Image (tube, helix red, strand yellow):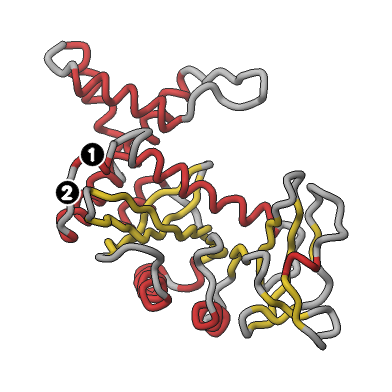
Amino acid sequence: MAAFVLKLLSIPTPFVISIDRTDWYLGEKPLNILMLSVVYEGLAFPLLWVVLEKKGCSDTAERIALLEQYEQLFGKDSLQFVTADREFIGTTWFAYLCKEKIPLRIRSRENLLVTTADGRKRVAARNLFRTQKSGVGVLLSGKRRVLGQELFLMGMRNAAGEYLIVASQEASQAVLSDYAKRWKIETLFGCLKSRGFCLEATHITEKERLEKLLALLTIAFCWAFLAGQWLTRQKPLKVKSHGRLAKSRFRCGFERLRHILCNLSERRQKIAFQQVIQLLSCT
């Protein structure tokens, strides 16, 4: 499935990989999905996933298994970097990423203890950014010891006083903007769930069936994106006064596909279906 997605969308290497988890409950039954996605054209597209038969966070072994599966398929050289939120930290996890030389852009908890510039003591990560101007990202000079690894830290404090601190092996001013690409997987989860395909409404709880359903939804998600891309080439989307598109390409394609499939008895929609089904061809 992962190779099909990359070929269908013609996503160039190296890939930006976002890892995250989504969950919901059916009664007292936890449905918990750990997903690895590729970020492209303002969206994240599912590549690999595993249904965790438990509630709560994923563990290091589960994350490593997912990345190793990716590496077996596409090789480590295909990675630009991996980005993830504060849930995805840990001494063993960071040690694995650094040992395998997998570039990371992972958000740190603001109270995580890291070393000062001289390396003599450890302080809460937020203390290193308290004196910085609100809303301005700052890359600290020199590496700091973070969860046992020598990493660079870039961070900022927003107007509400919340800290965004991201760890990376590289001293790049783009660390925060790189990390921002992580949010695309949140958009993906919304499209798969309540803002699109309503995955949680299926009431499927069996692990194997849910993983197969995710494969079908991956195809449907890519199809909706390609349909939206095709439609907007014919008629560009309107841009609102705040500078954002009035509708996403996914939403545009999703609504068009839904209209076609719900009205296939009409001759006009049968013709339209023949057009949009061609979008799923990799040739």
**Residue 150, relative to residue 62: is it above or below?**
below
Residue 146: quarter of image = bottom right
Q: From the viewer's side, name the closer residue of 226 and 189.
A: 189
Residue 261: quarter of image = top left
**Residue 5, relative to residue 108: is it above or below?**
above
Could you say where residue 203 lies in the image, as x and y percent from the top left?
18, 45
**Residue 29, relative to residue 227: is it above or below?**
below
Whole-number angstrom distance, CA of label 2 to CA of label 1: 8 Å
- The 10 Å Cα crowd at callout 1, few under 14, some 14 to 19, many 20 or more, is few
Could you say where residue 159 lies in the image, as x and y percent from the top left?
76, 44
Query: Is residue 16 toward the left or the right of residue 175 in the image?
Result: left
Could you say where residue 201 lies in the image, as x and y percent from the top left?
23, 39
Question: Hey, what amino acid is under mark 1?
Answer: Ala
Residue 201's tag is 1
Say which quadrant the N terminus sits in. Answer: bottom left
What residue lies at 54% left-to-right and 60% top-to-bottom? Answer: 85
Q: How many marks on residues?
A: 2
Question: Hey, what amino acid is under mark 2?
Answer: Ile
Q: From the viewer's side, name the closer residue of 183 and 90.
A: 90
- The 10 Å Cα crowd at callout 2, few under 14, some 14 to 19, many 20 or more, is some
Could you say where residue 22 lies in the image, as x and y percent from the top left?
38, 53
Q: From the viewer's side, name the closer residue of 47 and 186.
A: 186
Q: Which residue is mark 2?
A: 204
Query: Is residue 174 toward the left or the right of residue 120 in the image?
Result: left
Say which quadrant the C terminus sits in. Answer: top left
